[in-house]
Image: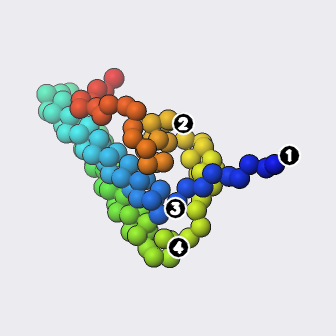
Amino acid sequence: MTMQQPSLIATAPLLQRIAIELLQCQAILSRIEHSVHVALDALAPLVPALSLQKNMQDIDLLEQNLADLALCLSAVAAEPALQAAQDLNEAHVLGRLRLEDLRHRLHGRPSNAEPADQIEIF
């Protein structure tokens, strides 16, 4: 009985792909923020000003956090010490991801889904 060797994934490229995903999330959030601003302009008289302002500030903070995390991961991925680090167990790192398309992108494979041009809020 032979034991199957774990499939390995390179650490630095994986971190760079995660950074790219974070930037894409930040861009999505930015579009949502813009859409919410446009939608709420019409509803402004009906929404308490302080509540609206706090929620918009939270969206902006989340957007900034995603962008900063992406920059941080990109810097970590570029570190020479990390470039020489051992590869990671692919199943352990990516096996728990629920989104198949995300798992494909983090592997460095093309996405199966078409990019969304429009954002719908339900």
Among numbered discs 2 and 3, the one appearing first in the sequence: 3
Q: Position of residue 120 (x, y in %)?
A: 28, 26
- Residue 1 or residue 29, whichever sits in front: 1
Among numbered discs 4 and 3, the one appearing first in the sequence: 3
- Residue 10 or residue 55, whichever sits in front: 10
Q: Amino acid at mark 4?
A: Ala
Q: Amino acid at mark 2?
A: Arg
Classify mark 1: residues with Cα within 10 Å, few (<14), some (14-19) or many (20+): few
Seen as rendered, the residue at the extreme top is 122
Does the residue at mark 2 contact the one at mark 3 (Cβ under 8 Å)? no
Among numbered discs 2 and 4, the one appearing first in the sequence: 4
- Residue 81 or residue 19, whichever sits in front: 81
Asked if one can make out residue 10 in the rendered structure from this viewpoint, the answer is yes
C-alpha gap between disc 2 and disc 3:
20 Å
C-alpha gap between disc 4 and disc 3:
9 Å
Q: Amino acid at mark 3?
A: Thr
Among numbered discs 1 and 2, the one appearing first in the sequence: 1
Q: Which residue is mark 3?
A: 11
Among numbered discs 1 and 3, the one appearing first in the sequence: 1
Residue visible at 40% across and 70% down in the picture: 78
In the rendered view of the protein, which quadrant contains the C terminus? top left
Residue visible at 20% across and 34% down in the picture: 35
Compared to residue 116, the image places residue 122 above or below, namely above
Q: Which residue is mark 4?
A: 84
Q: Position of residue 10 (x, y in %)?
A: 52, 60
Q: Amino acid at mark 1?
A: Met
Residue 30 occupies quadrant: top left
Q: Which mark is residue 1?
A: 1
Q: Depth-wise, is mark 1 or mark 2 nearer the camera? A: 1
